[in-house]
Amino acid sequence: MNVSRRTVSLGGLGLLAATSLSSTAASAEGLISDLMEGSDEFADAVEAYIYGYPLVTMEMTRRVITNVAEPVGTKGPMGQLIKLREYPNASFRDVTAPNADTLYTTAFLDVGDEPWVVSLPDLNDRYALFPMLDGWTTVFDVPGKRTTGTEAQTFAITGPGWEGALPDGVKQYKSPTSIVWLLGRIYCTGTPEDYAAVHKIQDEVKLYPLSAWGKEWTPPAGKVDPSIDMKTAVRDQVNKMDAVEYFTLLAELLKRNPPNAADAPMLEKLAQIGIVPGQDFDKSKFDPAFAKRIPELGFAKIMLHFKFSDGDIKNIDGWGFTTKTGIYGTNYVQRALITAIGLGANRPQDAVYPTSQKSAGGIVRRKYDGAEKYVLTFKKGLTPPVSGFWSLTMYDENYFFVDNPLNRYSISERQPLKANADGSIDLLIQNESPGADKESNWLPAPKGRFILMMRLYWPNESDPSIIDGSWTIPPVKKVG
């Protein structure tokens, strides 16, 4: 199977980077104009679709990722760790917008029947984070260097309604839902020596059910379900469901993945169309004439939020990004949008992913083109303010790495960046080498179109900070 952004966006691997967003939003406007005014039932059903989109998408993602007998590549059975061992190169096509900064250690869990225990080794001060997402895509906790430090630690993830005692020294993280996605990231420089060090850490991460505490435990082989579609993109699988199929699955998922207390007003609307948590979908309360239009209009409204987000999505000097990820409250449309374009996104305190497709300057901003030369200049002392790390990654127009003589796909402080006489730092973005004396600051571009993505891990939360707007990314300017 070829896993693409449309299939699985592993851990927000390029938030706001889907190339079709603008066209999707444009076509959505026409669909919204056809909304069947005067039908409260129809309007409630569209809202219900948006509300349930993260839970349904998470479940379909879980099915595809875990439908294997043993861990391989980006997949692994339920309750088993998936360990990505190296960064991809320019020939890699399994995931769009890959990163060359962190190695993933992930797993899908079902904590509805019993807790699962995670043991992390001593990270020796290495940056890492292990966010846990519930079925609604909320990041309900984030063990890691920012929050719990880097010493060895053991914690248990408990499900909704679980009551019991944990072994001494085991911290409890309460998941609001039975579905949990552990989405660990460990910083790695990509050298052979650092790969070996991170592999050792990955191999020392342990995952097992609480019932196996103190015992030798070997995970059973995964069960492969041949009925699961392993070829069609997850988002396409979700979007092609008619409303009856969609709401039937949503109602089933609500039995083990309860809504939040703040969702009470939305639950009243769901009840009007036959969806009551803990019960099967009551089709008798739903007009089958709406079955096709509701998914079309529901997804159209989700994608329109990208264009008309009322501040949820920002665009500053050619950089598009959001700081409203991970925790959504009752902002259901923002939650659904991030699910659609950046499933697995971190809290902004852990990571922000600004993306740029056009250079600044001039009356009309033009898409980046390798036939031109560009520069991103950080003034003295104004490199990205982060406690984790920052990087700038180069992608071609399809969000894949670009083959280049340095095998360099991103640039960051890992490189020995040379400062100018005034202390500023230029990142040179172009196809041809700027010369051996400047290659330390060179981010190689393809000959054609390209896209830039910045990763800001553990950004400052106060001045200067991208989170509160007291720091902004400088514009990328065309040279000459």
Image: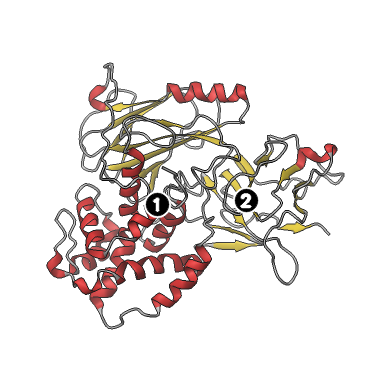
| Relative horizontal placement of residue 434, taking residue 165 as reference (left or right) | right
Residue 127 visible somewhere in the drawing: yes
Report helix, strand or loop for mark 1: loop
Seen at 30% across and 64% down, the residue is 49
Q: Earlier in the sequence, mark 2 or mark 1?
A: 1
Query: What residue would you read off at disc 2?
Result: 396
Quadrant (top left/top right/bottom left/bottom right) for the C terminus: bottom right
- Residue reaching furthest bottom? 38
Q: Is residue 118 above or below residue 91?
A: above
CA distance separating discs 2 and 1: 21 Å
State whether residue 51 is above or below residue 103.
below
Measuring from the top left, give residue 471's x and y in whole percent. Answer: 65, 54
Q: Residue at x 44, y 22 (%)?
A: 203
Seen from the viewer's position, the closer of residues 246 and 93 is 93
**Quadrant of residue 387 in the image?**
top right
Q: Which residue occupies 23% across, 68% down?
A: 269
Say which residue appears at 65% left-offset and 61% top-offset. 318
Report the quarter where the N terminus lies: top left
Q: Secondary structure at mark 2?
A: strand
Task: Classify residue 13 as left or right of residue 448.
Answer: left
Amino acid type at image mark 1: Ala
Q: Residues within 10 Å of mark 1 (few under 14, many from 20)?
A: many
The front one of 107 and 313 is 107
Reading the image, the residue beneath label 1 is 233
Q: Residues within 10 Å of mark 2 (few under 14, many from 20)?
A: many
Return the x and y of residue 322 as percentages of the image width and height. Answer: 52, 57
Give the residue type that dot 2 points to.
Asp
